[in-house]
Image: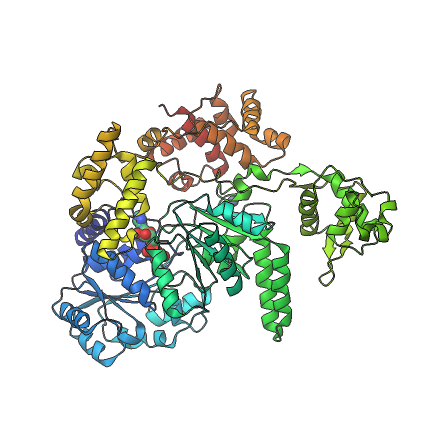
């Protein structure tokens, strides 16, 4: 293609993104992938779930004159995409046996008359001779193979029909081929490239990090209450709770329902009619919570799942990642919480021990240990997660996991209580479990204590400063940190070498004592515009009504992000409505007037003006300092701010407060975000240790890109300024924004 032609096609892609899909920018690597396909190079795209794979073939599908065939293994996903594309006025259809004769015939006619742009087929359908005959009479421009890892025998989900796709591809030597998947080991990738004739330069691998997912782990302690408290933070929002067993699913669902929560179960023990009914109700927002085994999730791509709660420990990171990946596909904040109990580890180990194949056993143990490394991590949880996918985490502090943000998790010096506990284990001859040790420490007159004459020990009744529950937490941490071993059969505790060092006072013991509370305080509002909640509720209720009328899932009409932005900018004209994320030409024509009327009405009643929506990130940021910016009155925060104002450096404060540098940075950042001013802001610049020239270019980069995400800024500075330095400069930058 000549340069001019190339440019024209690229512009076309960008226009479609804006005018049809209503999105302002391509996401990381989407643009490169689309360019490559438009240049008719076979392409392999590896992107995490929610990364935006569909757009990579949907846009070329619209640009190309001929037909684009999309191969996908799941009927429900194909139908969902067709519904969404039709909502965008893109002619797309599916051919499969579940269609009525009339619908099937209508779709066939559409294809023959070249009215259809995207045709979705299951691999076995595509290979049927009647379908092949039909297709060879069409001008096929592009073949997209979704879930392409199914092509490889090395993959975890090999499907023989996928292997046969070569026959389809050979029929269309002029069609460009794109393979997409969210999971592929190097071996599988090589296999896909070889089979589909894809060169190394046409392979695009995106990061597996999903920055909008908050990752948290808390000790499983009173799981039902913890779970209930967690889901109650998200009323009327969609969430998934994963349990290990069907029985667990049924019990938890019943309890939640009894407590008035909108929940339904999902597992392989339910009839398929029930399963698809419950799934559909979830997709349509008729029910908000799905309690499920791992059987749930493959066939849905609901973009607005706001949380995933793991009630039990997953067996491996692969599964855990896949499950949390179902949250926040729309790019908005989503909350992922794991309840982590040692009992669960025991159960999994028990199952592993039952395995007869030694190789499988070793593998299962390794997978469990990787999962434990994440659950027990004291530093950023993204590090073990990304390591699993062979990626290195870019930053020390991700700002979006409990360990990176959590002030609820600041550790204290617990050397003395640890010594009390350990020495009590020693004096009771390492024959008892935690509960008995605690009874002794707290001076209980339980029969078991008296019978063993443990009331005569020097450690009897020396531990009343803590509740039983607090001691339990401490015991768990002593086990977790390898000071105690627990006998798997009897639960008795044994001292290790490490315990000796703490007992002798050679090493201190730092840990968490307070049960970390589940709060929503971490929810970074990085990507969420705080729309007027009253209007959001009105728009949502209305969307639900429209969706039910049209027999569509609500997200196919507008995404949550779209409604939120409407309730933030209050657009009054079609032009301004078009500036809202997710509003393209087709949706404008279909729903524009209706939504403008709703917004207008609300604004009149509440005397609200339209907010200007110039696309510049900084102006959005400044106006977003709205009514609900909370003054951080947290006392720790106040201490940190005053320490800062006396001229202390971040690292010396970190030492003083016994927290990580990142925690201090977070306090300062939040303070600035809440609109407060520092007495000596330039201190931040000095502490970065950067030259004036670097400072200037970094601040300019914040103004040009958004300050909300550091990566674009980091990249634009050719990686010359480190993330740590950028964190400091960002605080300065935000503190200088004027109201
Ligand atoms: P995947 O197939 O990789 O799991 P999807 O293609 O379903 O992901 O995309 C996930 C969500 O992200 C969808 O709701 C989609 O509309 C949205 N999305 C994709 N690309 C963009 C973009 N460039 N800008 C905004 N939203 C996008
Ligand atoms: Zn982190």
Give the residue at x 32% y 65%: 76
Of residue 189 and residue 382, the one placed in the foreground of this image is 382
Q: Position of residue 186 (x, y in %)?
A: 45, 64
In front: 503, or 391? 503
Q: Is residue 92 visible?
A: yes
User: Coloured how?
Assistant: rainbow
Q: In the figure, is residue 274 to the left or right of 141?
A: right
The quadrant of the image that shows the N terminus is bottom left
Left or right, residue 675 beside residue 647: left
Residue 717 is drawn in which quadrant?
A: top left
Residue 565 location (% of width, % of height): 29, 39
Please identify the residue farthest to the bottom as the structure is shown.
129
Visible in this render: residue 389? no
Residue 320 in the image: x percent, y percent? 50, 57
At x 32%, y 33%, the residue is 620
Whether residue 168 sits left or right of residue 248 in the image: it is left
Q: Position of residue 472 (x, y in %)?
A: 69, 47
Q: Quadrant of the C terminus?
A: top left
- Furthest toward the left, the residue is 113
Taking 188 as reference, is 530 above or below it?
Answer: above
The number of numbered badges drawn on the structure is 0
Which residue is at the front of the view, 690 or 154? 154
- Observer-nearest of 301 and 656: 301
Relative side of 55 to 248, left or right = left
The residue located at (49%, 20%) in the rendering is 680
| Relative height, residue 370 to residue 138 (above, below) | above
């Amino acid at each position: 293609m000549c340069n001019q032609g190339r440019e024209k096609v690229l512009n076309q892609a960008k226009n479609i993104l804006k005018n049809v899909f209503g999105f302002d920018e391509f996401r990381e690597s989407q643009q490169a992938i689309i360019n490559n396909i438009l240049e008719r190079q076979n392409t392999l795209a590896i992107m995490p779930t929610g990364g935006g794979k569909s757009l990579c073939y949907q846009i070329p599908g619209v640009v190309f004159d001929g037909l684009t065939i999309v191969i996908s293994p799941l009927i429900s996903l194909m139908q969902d995409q067709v519904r969404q594309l039709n909502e965008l006025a893109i002619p797309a259809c599916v051919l499969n046996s579940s269609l009525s004769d009339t619908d099937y015939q209508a779709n066939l006619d559409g294809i023959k008359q070249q009215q259809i742009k995207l045709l979705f087929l299951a691999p076995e359908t595509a290979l049927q001779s009647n379908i092949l005959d039909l297709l060879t009479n069409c001008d096929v421009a592009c073949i997209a193979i979704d879930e392409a890892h199914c092509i490889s025998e090395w993959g975890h989900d090999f499907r023989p029909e996928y292997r046969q796709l070569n026959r389809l591809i050979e029929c269309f030597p002029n069609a460009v081929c794109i393979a997409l998947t969210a999971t592929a080991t190097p071996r599988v990738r090589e296999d896909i490239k070889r089979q589909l004739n894809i060169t190394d330069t046409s392979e695009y691998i995106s990061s597996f990090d999903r920055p909008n997912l908050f990752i948290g782990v808390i000790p499983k302690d009173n799981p039902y209450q913890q779970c209930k408290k967690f889901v109650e933070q998200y009323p009327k929002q969609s969430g998934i709770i994963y349990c290990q067993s069907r029985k667990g699913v049924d019990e938890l669902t019943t309890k939640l329902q009894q407590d008035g929560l909108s929940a339904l179960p999902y597992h392989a023990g339910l009839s398929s009619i029930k399963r698809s009914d419950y799934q559909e109700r979830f997709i349509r927002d008729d029910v908000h919570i799905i309690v499920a085994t791992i059987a749930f999730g493959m066939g849905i791509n609901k973009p607005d799942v706001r949380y995933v709660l793991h009630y039990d420990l997953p067996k491996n990171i692969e599964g855990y990642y896949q499950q949390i990946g179902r949250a926040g596909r729309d790019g908005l904040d989503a909350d992922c919480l794991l309840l982590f109990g040692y009992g669960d580890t025991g159960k999994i180990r028990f199952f592993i021990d039952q395995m007869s194949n030694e190789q499988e056993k070793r593998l299962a143990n390794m997978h469990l240990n990787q999962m434990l490394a994440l659950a027990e991590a004291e530093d950023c949880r993204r590090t073990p997660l990304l390591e699993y996918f062979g990626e290195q985490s870019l930053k020390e502090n991700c700002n979006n996991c409990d360990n990176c943000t959590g002030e609820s998790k600041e550790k204290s010096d617990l050397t003395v209580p640890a010594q009390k506990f350990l020495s009590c284990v020693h004096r009771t001859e390492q024959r008892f479990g935690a509960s008995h040790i605690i009874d002794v420490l707290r001076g209980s007159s339980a029969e078991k204590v008296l019978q063993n004459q443990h009331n005569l020990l020097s450690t009897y009744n020396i531990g009343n400063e803590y509740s039983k529950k607090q001691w339990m937490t401490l015991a768990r941490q002593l086990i977790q940190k390898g000071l105690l071993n627990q006998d798997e059969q009897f639960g008795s505790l044994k001292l290790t070498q490490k315990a000796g060092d703490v007992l002798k006072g050679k090493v201190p013991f730092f840990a968490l004592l307070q049960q970390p509370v589940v709060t929503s305080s971490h929810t970074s509002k990085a990507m969420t515009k705080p729309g007027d909640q009253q209007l959001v509720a009105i728009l949502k209720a209305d969307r639900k009504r429209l969706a039910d009328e049209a027999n569509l899932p609500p997200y196919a009409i507008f995404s949550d992000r779209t409604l939120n932005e409407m309730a933030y900018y209050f657009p009054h004209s079609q032009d301004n409505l078009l500036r809202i994320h997710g509003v393209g030409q087709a949706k404008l024509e279909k729903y524009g007037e209706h939504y403008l009327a709703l917004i207008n009405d609300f604004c009149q009643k509440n005397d609200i003006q339209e907010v200007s929506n110039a696309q510049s990130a900084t102006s959005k940021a400044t106006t977003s300092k709205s009514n609900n910016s909370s003054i951080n009155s947290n006392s720790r925060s106040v201490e940190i701010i005053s320490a800062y104002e006396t001229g202390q450096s971040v690292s010396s404060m970190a030492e003083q407060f016994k927290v990580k540098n990142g925690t201090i940075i977070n306090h300062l950042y939040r303070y600035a975000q809440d609109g407060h001013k520092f007495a000596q802001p330039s201190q931040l610049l000095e502490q970065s240790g950067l030259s004036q020239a670097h400072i200037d270019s970094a601040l300019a980069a914040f103004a040009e890109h958004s300050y909300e995400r550091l990566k674009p800024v980091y990249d634009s500075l050719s990686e010359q300024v480190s993330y740590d330095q950028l964190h400091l400069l960002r605080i300065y930058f935000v503190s200088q924004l004027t109201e």
